[in-house]
Image (tube, rainbow, N blue to C red):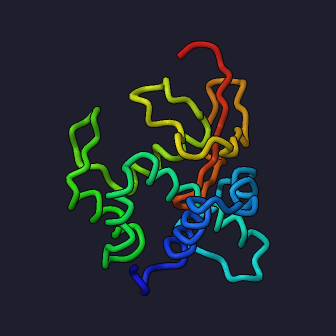
Amino acid sequence: ADNNDVSWINEGFAEVGAFLNGYDVGGADFSYAQNPDLQLNSWSDSSSPDFGSHYGESFLYLTYFLDRYGETATKALTNNPLNDLSSVDDTLKSLNITDQQTGKTVTADDVFMDWASALYLHDGNVGDGRYIYHNYASIPQTSASETISTCPQSANNYTVNQYGIDYIDIQCAGD
């Protein structure tokens, strides 16, 4: 509905449409889940080795958005004239969607952080139930890319892309 939106939203919604109509999304979601440190809102050119993973990432983010905020909010997002993450922010604000825990308006960054947690946790019993997909039973599971077992430890040597995800498993005793 928004012909000039950015690739990750246009193509992500194309994948959501295929999914909703019973078509296989082709495994790009599983490709993404193997290496989630990929910037959501910045697509590589079609010759990039991770191009398919961009489709998987966008599909998973927008499917989570649909699952969590419903059809009305998702339709509003597809029709929002703003582009990129600004359209997510504007949609959530215009629909007055607030976080049950904080009472504040949900932002695109909030959705991203909850989505990143849902990809790892897959557990509707954590918190208020937001860390699970109800509409996609075969969602791929992400896993930790690093493990820290000796503490204290400096994390200065870790990097992650903006709107990318790294999961670090901390297995130290104590707080």
Residue 159 in view (yes/no): yes
The residue shown at (65%, 24%) is 151
Residue 58 in view (yes/no): no
Residue 17 vs 142, above or below: the answer is: below
Extreme residue toward the top, this view: 174
Q: In the rendered image, which quarter contains the N terminus?
A: bottom left
Q: Is residue 111 left or right of residue 46?
A: left
**Depth order, front residue of 168/114:** 114
**How many labels were placed on the picture?**
0
Residue 152 vs 97, above or below: the answer is: above
**Quadrant of the rendered image containing residue 86:** bottom left
The residue shown at (44%, 54%) is 66
> Picture coordinates of residue 82 (x, y %)?
32, 77
> Picture coordinates of residue 109 (x, y %)?
40, 54
Q: Is residue 4 left or right of residue 89?
A: right
> Picture coordinates of residue 63 (x, y %)?
52, 55
Extreme residue toward the bottom, this view: 4
The residue shown at (56%, 59%) is 20
**Quadrant of the rendered image containing residue 58:** bottom right
Q: Is residue 60 left or right of residue 87?
A: right
**Depth order, front residue of 69/9:** 69
The residue shown at (59%, 34%) is 122
**Depth order, front residue of 174/135:** 135
Q: Is residue 51 left or right of residue 72?
A: right
